[in-house]
Image (cartoon, rainbow, N blue to C red):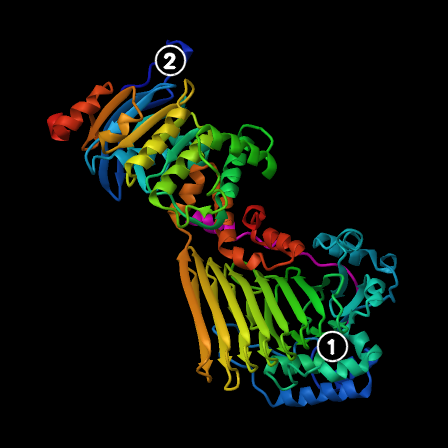
Amino acid sequence: MTSIESQVLQPYKYGFTTDIEAEVVPPGLSEDVIRLISMKKGEPDWMLDWRLKAYRNWTKMTEPKWSNVKYGPIDYQAISYYAAPKQRPKVESLDQVDPKLLETFEKLGIPIAEQKRLAGVAVDAVFDSVSVATTFREELAKHGVIFCPISEAIREHPDLVREYLGSVVPVNDNFFAALNSAVFTDGSFAYIPKGVRCPLELSTYFRINAQATGQFERTLIVAEAGSYVSYLEGCSAPSRDENQLHAAVVELVALDNAQIKYSTIQNWYPGDEEGKGGIYNFVTKRGACRGKNSKISWTQVETGSAITWKYPGCILQGDGSIGEFYSVAVTNNRQQADTGTKMIHMGKNTKSTIVSKGISAGHGQNTYRGLVKILKGAEGARNYSQCDSMLIGDQCGAHTFPYIDVRNSSAIMEHEASTSKIGEDQIFYCKQRGLSAEDAVSMIVNGFCKEVFKELPMEFAVEAQNLLGISLEGSVG
Amino acid sequence: MTPPTTDHRPQTTVPLLEIRDLHATVEGNEILKGVDLTVRTGEVHAIMGPNGSGKSTLAQLLAGHPAYSVTSGSVRFDGKDLFELDPEERAREGLFLAFQYPVAIRGITNSYFLRSAVNAMRKHKGLPELDPLDFLQVLEDKLKAIGWDDSFMNRAVNEGFSGGEKKRNEILQLAVLEPRLAILDETDSGLDIDALKTVAAAVNALRSKERSFVVVTHYQRLLNYIVPDFVHVLAEGRIVRSGGKELALTLEEKGYAGVGA
């Protein structure tokens, strides 16, 4: 199996840094640092108060240790909590953006200009912590859609932000969410008005660039009654020798009959073969299906980071609301992933679907952890869960922790799980038909992930294909 | 071990496959104990033998299955040392194995799998790859030529296929990949008589002056439909008897013991 392993364990291709001067606040966290961040961003008082409240909560909390991942202690005072590219232009068009920045996006395969012209994708590009380019704003504005950096939304749309920020993930929700609430520097805000089908896929590319700068993104998406939005989040980070903490918070709110489709490709630096230098990705993502018949779908392809620790979940409050979670998580070398979802059924006739595919290679450890909770009032709730694990080589591990908590006897629960190994016989069969071992593994892995990939928007499916070295065409058709 | 001395012969008689004193082991047990076999272009050879005689070992070894180790002897395929080639290179050079137990690949359609295989072969030959539409045309022609419909092209490779469907699928791949040497490993096992006839008819349609077959089978039955030019009896890792197609009938009558196997 060594040849199979070696070709799966390919070096990270996006390891480069861009030479842009960054304005970095000295390491350490205190109320003064938070005041400085808030001031630099020109925030109103209520926002500063909110941050300080989060910070005071955080100081009383301890870092959770229950996950099935291992990492050294994090020194929160050694992290710099704010970095902004020094040259921060007010951008009306892409021409005004630092060409070096655009070059970085090109290297990452994110041709903004190209997307603007061809794909019809509005990109709110986050470079380190400050958003520098927003496209298609005008087109979106015609439909009343707001899509902007959250720092701008705090200034321009304070009522909306105040109403929804922290309403799904409260400031004291967990250790990392509290930290994020205290120090987040930017992220995206999207608001889809009543009855509007967002005409473009909203897309944000996150990128960690300045060394030893923790990245604390904050995303808030609100879909008013009867609206629809598809949001794409794609990530890549340059090579680093020291671990970088990433603790993002994403909140989604769907009102009556609204639908939010949230897709992620996460390809942060996973560390070298020994696991040195990779990103710690400790994220809180949660959606509230507040309205009746609302729907939130999370689709994620997680291939990067030294450690991935996240559980995009849905709170199914509205009667007849639907939550979905489709996930592919790949761990190789020394990567560790503890990921899954939480589906909390509160409303009547709520439905949830979970499809999780874990792939482990090298010394990778892959854990699925999922909670399905049916509350007392959730008459007629249904859940379907499917957790499949694939092992490549004999040094890796797959673990499954499904938690099921049912308080209403009318619930219908289904759970399927499988573990398979890429077999010598499968590889040999493909080789006998002229395919290389590399193509054979790609094909087998791709087939394994098909149910998740088909949930991705087309352009993202292509990225997923590139990431896993997989040719998708046939499985889609 | 006799080195091959074929250089003086006319080009057309250079053997496509030449096995000399082949010894092979699996997990330390010697299974092949000196096999000699020469297959020329356009010939159909049947290899028969009792269970455990080494028939399937020979078939899989020729295709390059990693479980088998060659301890001595040589195999030349179209003049090249076969053991110098990786399994995928052997396939691209035109050696095809119809598996006794075809493997399932979840989530990948038959048509995608086949197109990938065809394109791997074409790339090897320096030909442009076929796009899905071109390939569909090729596929339709092949299906028509062997008298089958395209009902299972959009199903995942061998997943949930019946025994008969799996064997038919192997023959369809043979038809599309157009190998120079096709090795059929117990293609008749698990087939009822109607399925056997269908598969045999397809194989017969694929016989040509440019293509050779090695048909590995336990029963004479298949050879009523795929009539070989030569029959060999493999027993305890050696070919103990060789003859024409009538040898198969003798075997049917007298059993393997009756021919000294």
Q: In terms of image quadrants, where is residue B215?
A: top left
Q: Is residue A299 left or right of residue B87?
A: right
| Towards the viewer: A247 or A347 | A347
Residue found at x 26% / y 34%: B55
Where B179 falls versus A343 (above or below)?
Answer: above
Residue B179 got which mark? none
Q: In terms of image quadrants, where is residue B7?
A: top left
Q: Measured from the top left, where is residue B95 in percent x and y?
A: 41, 30
Residue range (magenta): A1-24
Residue A26 got which mark? 1
Label 2 belongs to which residue? B13
Q: Measured from the top left, where is residue B107 in percent x and y?
A: 49, 51
> Which of pointers 1 and 2 indicates the residue nearer the eye?
2
Q: Measured from the top left, where is residue A132 in percent x and y?
A: 81, 65
Q: Amino acid at mark 1?
A: Pro
Chain bearing mark 2: B
Q: In terms of image quadrants, where is residue A15?
A: bottom right
Q: Is residue B15 visible?
A: yes
Residue found at x 58% / y 56%: A454
Q: Amino acid at mark 2?
A: Thr
Residue found at x 63% / y 54%: A463
